[in-house]
Image (cartoon, grey):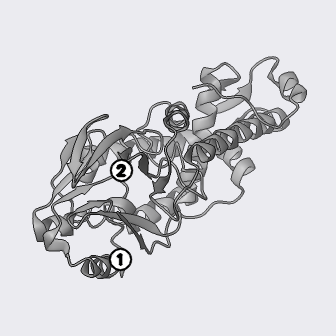
Amino acid sequence: MERIALSNSTFEGHNNAYLLGERVLVDTGDRLPGTQEQLEAVLERHDTSFDEIERIFLTHWHGDHRGLAGPIQRASDAEVYVHEADAPLVAGDAEAWDALVDRQERYFDHWGIPPGKQDEVRATLADVAWRDDAPDVRTIVDDETFTVGDDRLRVVHAPGHTAGLCMFELGGEVLSGDALLPKYTPNVGGADIRVERPLERYLETLRAITEAEYGRAWPGHREVIEEPADRAEFIIGHHEERAYRVLEALSRRGPCNTWTVSAELFGALEAIHILHGPGESYAHLEHLEREGSVIREGDEYRLADGVAARIDELEEKRWPLES
């Protein structure tokens, strides 16, 4: 297996595609200028090319991971595999995309994003080639297995960042996509507004990674993760610290909407972060509402009775989260 680092200045740093043997890819990078040439150059060093790729496994629907799947498929007739929950978006299904956009628009209003900022994030999303050159896809499900050379590739559904995000187990290690990243904490809530109970789903994914005891994780961005369980535990702790900050903001400010909480957590936001910031804030507010720590009244949230006192009693600035 070879990790192929591809440029990406839009999101979490360089994307990774992975070449398994000479004919199988996991993710393909984006469609920004220069990415295709970078991928083709690496394939050429392995005496292969787009027209020789036989299978592509996609971790999820985002354009910086599936961007070149369509062009490669047209060159080679490669089979493109993606989880059934993300497949309609990867395939460019108009109904699925319309439903996604409609839901985004409803959340923009519910979260309280100011009109000018709504226009800014719409323009950002319009600039990303999410739907260009859509491939035909085959759906996969959790625990499905494939033979790749002498190895067994197992599908591990890992929702949170997207509804259909999958990792791929291979020889005691895992290709983790954006479920586990070495530097950033993958966005939940904004990255795929279709996910129900996004923080809960993501905490379940992180705890499953911890329990799996993978030797290493090969992420969708940046370098290999040598201790995946430790990284997963760190991210769980990060979300507990963020939950504390959400509750502390509500204690200090009183009832407020998601956009106000987002400003407390992340400050001023631009471009794609106008979606990701309130999306992540909403994921925490929704989770805290279901556990009874927060009460929603219309588009605003307030602390439940007794929570302010519990915050003050905590020795660490972390709010325990259960999935």
In the depicted structure, whether residue 258 falls above or below residue 90: above
In the depicted structure, whether residue 41 falls above or below residue 277: below
Q: Amino acid at mark 2?
A: His
Q: Nearer the viewer, residue 68 or 267?
A: 68
Q: Quadrant of residue 65?
A: bottom left
Q: Amino acid at mark 1?
A: Thr
Give the labeled residue for mark 2.
60
Can residue 294 be seen in this snapshot?
Answer: yes
In the depicted structure, whether residue 306 falls above or below residue 39: above
Please name the residue shown 48% across and 70% down the image: 14
Left or right: residue 84 versus residue 272 is left
Q: Quadrant of residue 194?
A: top left
Relative image position of residue 203 (x, y in whole percent): 56, 34
Relative image position of residue 88 (x, y in whole percent): 24, 45
Q: Tell me how far mark 2 sits from mark 1, CA to CA.
A: 18 Å
Left or right: residue 125 versus residue 75 is right
If you read the primary sequence from the N terminus, does the residue marked by circle 2 or circle 1 appear first?
A: 1
Relative image position of residue 306 (x, y in whole percent): 82, 17
Can residue 299 be seen in this snapshot?
Answer: no
Describe the element under mark 1 as helix, strand or loop.
Answer: helix
For label 1, count other residues whose C-alpha is less than 10 Å away and answer few (under 14), some (14-19) or many (20+): many
For label 2, count other residues whose C-alpha is less than 10 Å away and answer few (under 14), some (14-19) or many (20+): many
In which quadrant will I find the N terminus?
bottom left
Q: Residue furthest front?
A: 150
Give the labeled residue for mark 1.
35
Please name the residue shown 14% across and 70% down the image: 52
